[in-house]
Amino acid sequence: MTETVRTVDEVVVASEDDTAVEPRTPRSWWRLVVLLIGALVFVFPFYYMIVGSLQKQSNTSLSGVLPQSSNITLHNYGEINAALSLGRALINSGIFTGGVLLATLVFGVLAGYALAQLHFRGRGLLFVMMLLLLMVPFQLLIIPLYVLIVRNYGLGNSYLGMIAPFAINSTAVFIFRQYFLQLPKELFDAARIDGANELRILTRIALPLVRPALLTAMLLTFIGPWNEYLWPFLITKQQSMQPLAVALANYMNTVQSTVSNPFGTILAGAFVLAVPAVVLFLAFQRYFVAPNIGSAVKG
Amino acid sequence: MKLEAELPLSTRESRVTRLARAVLGRQPIGLAFGAPYALFIAVLFAYPLGLAVWVSFHRYFFTAPGVSVARPFVGLANYKAVLSDPAVLRSFLNILIFLVINVPLTVGLSLLLATALNAAIPFRAFFRACFYVPYVTASVAMVAVWLFMFSSGGVVNSVLGPLAPVPSWLVNQNWAMPSIAIYVTWKQLGFFILLYLAALQNVPKELYEAASMDGASWWHRLRSVTIPGVRTVTTLITLLAIIVGANLFTEPYLLTAGGGPNGKSASPVLLMYQTGIEQNHPDFASALGIILVIGVLLIVGVQRLLQRNQT
C-alpha cells in the first residue's frame, strides 16, 4: 500500500484548477478531433433518449435522429407517470439514497477519522475488514443477505431493508481516511493539548479542512443507491415501495402493447431516472475531478 | 506512550486510566467512533459471508414462514453441482469473453482520451463532463436507450444497412456477450479517463522533455514514458474489470433478456438470482457465490503480490 501524501493546500488547489501540464503545441488539433469523436459517442445516447422520449410514434430510422416538429409530444411522460406513479417512485429513490447518504456522512466520517487519526485497539482489524469489503463484490452476498433481511428479519418491502446493505459506503470511508491522513498531525496534537475533545476536533478542525473530499465522497455515494437495481429489485415486490430504477425495469420487462409508443414511454422514464444524477454531477463537477478520485483509489 | 507519560497532565491521571489506555489504545474514543462501521461490517458483511458458507454446505431451501425443516449437512455436494453445471461453466466462459473485450478496449480508449485531454485545449471541462456522464447515470436508464438503438430495426442497424448482424445484436448468439462488454466499456470509460488523467498529471514533465530532446517519436514517448507512468492505473482497471465481470447482473438481465439467447450472455450473478431465488436453490447459489468470492480474492491477492514485487 503506497499512500499518497499530499498537503491540504495542494489538494484544494488541484480540485479547483486541474489545468493542463503539457504546453500547448501547434499539433494539438488531433486532440480536438479525438475528443470530439469521443464526446459524440458518449453524448449521442443521451440526446437520442430525449429525442426518442418526445416522439409520438417511435421512429428508429435515420430520419428519427433529428426531432421532427410533426412528431413531437409530451404524451410519453404522461403515460409513464400513469404506469409507474413517477412521484412515488422518485420519493422511494430519494428515501433510499438519502438514508445511505446520511448514514455514510455520519458514521463514515467518524470511522474514517478514527482510522486516520486515532490510536485505539482494533484499528488494524477494522482497516483490514474495510479493504476486504471493498474487494468482495456486494452482489456475491445477495443470497445470504436475502435470507437474513427478507426471511429472518421480515424487512422485505421496507426502506430499512433497502438501505441496510448500503448504509455505510466503504469507498467513502476510504476517501475520508485518505484525506484525514493528509492533515498534519501537529494540528490535532495542539488541539488535544488545548483540551478539545475528539468530536470537537473532528467537527471544528478536521471536517472544514476536507470539505472538497466530503463532496466528492457524497457524489460517489449518491450514484450507488440512486442507480442500484439488483438489491431493491430483490426486496421490493410491492410497486408502491419500488425505487424508480426498479419500477422502470419492471415496466420494461412487462409492458409494451398497452401504450401507443412503448419505446417512447420507456425512454421518458429513463430520462426522469437519469436527470437527477446528471444534473448533480454537472453542478458539482469541480469536485469530481481527477486528483480527488485519484487519491481515493491509489491507496 | 513514553512522551505522554512525561507530560505533567498524565501524571495526575489515575492508574485505572493508564491501564485503560494500555488496553484500549491512546485514544479509546476511536472505539466509539469506529463502532457503528464495525457493527455494519459485522452484521451486513461478515455474518452474511459466514451464513453463505454455512448454507453452501447444507441442503437449504426457502419454506413458508414458521415451517421448520431439516437442513442436513451435505459436504461438498453443492460445490460439485455448481462446478459440473454446464450453465455455470458457460457463465464463466461469458465472463472471460467479457474481459477479453472489455479490458483492452477500456485501457486503450481511456488512455487515448485522457492523453488528448491532458493539455490546454478549448472546452476541456465540457469534454471531461461528456465522458463521465454515462458513468454516473443509472444502468437501467442507459440500457433502455441501448435497447432502442440496437433493436433489429434500430438506428444502429439503419446506419449499417446490409452489414447489420442477423439476428440483431442483443438476440444474436455470437453478439450478445460482446454487446454487453462494449456497453459496459462505454458506460464506465469516463471514470477510467479521470483516473488516467490523474496519473498522467503525476508523470514528471522532465521525462517528456528529455525524451523529446533525444528525438523520440510519439510512439516511443508513449511506450517508454506514458505507459510505465500510468501502470498502477492500468492494473487497477484490469482488477476492477474482473470485479465488474464477477458482478454483472443488470446488463444481462435487462439488455439481453435474462442472459439470452440460450445462456450465451448469462453471468454468474444472474445464475445466482435465477437458481437461488427464482428456483429456490439458495444452497447451490451460495456455493456459486463463495466460489466467486474466493476467485476474486485470489486474483486481488495475486495482483497485490505482483505489484509489491515490481516496486
Image (spheres, rainbow, N blue to C red):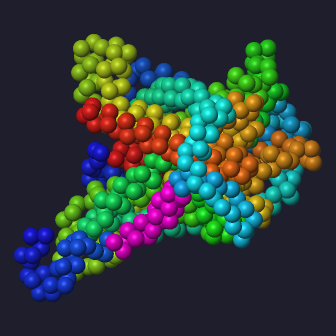
Where residue A253 appears, x then y in whole percent? 80, 45
Give me the residue at 34% from left, 65% from top.
Answer: A113
Where residue A42 appears, x then y in whole percent? 61, 34
Is A236 situated left or right of B25 in this image?
right
The stretch drawn in magenta includes residue A48: no
Where residue B109 appears, x then y in whole percent? 51, 27
- Closest to the observer, B77 or A219: B77
The range drawn in magenta is B31-51
Is A292 situated left or right of B94 in this image?
left
Give me the residue at 71% from left, 32% from top.
Answer: B263
Q: Quadrant of the N terminus of chain B?
A: bottom left
Where residue B309 appears, x then y in whole percent? 26, 33
Please say if B5 is above or below B256: below
Q: Quadrant of residue B232?
A: top left
Q: Quadrant of residue A243?
A: bottom right
| Residue B133 visible to the viewer | no
Give me the residue at 47% from left, 43% from top.
Answer: B294
Please say if B103 is above or below B22: above
The dominant secondary structure in magenta is: helix
- Closest to the observer, B231 or B249: B249
- Closest to the observer, A242 or A105: A242
Is B231 situated left or right of A167 in this image?
left
Please say if B70 is above or below B12: above
Q: Quadrant of the C terminus of chain B?
A: top left
Give me the residue at 45% from left, 47% from top.
Answer: A135
The stretch drawn in magenta includes residue B38: yes
Please say if B235 is above or below A168: above
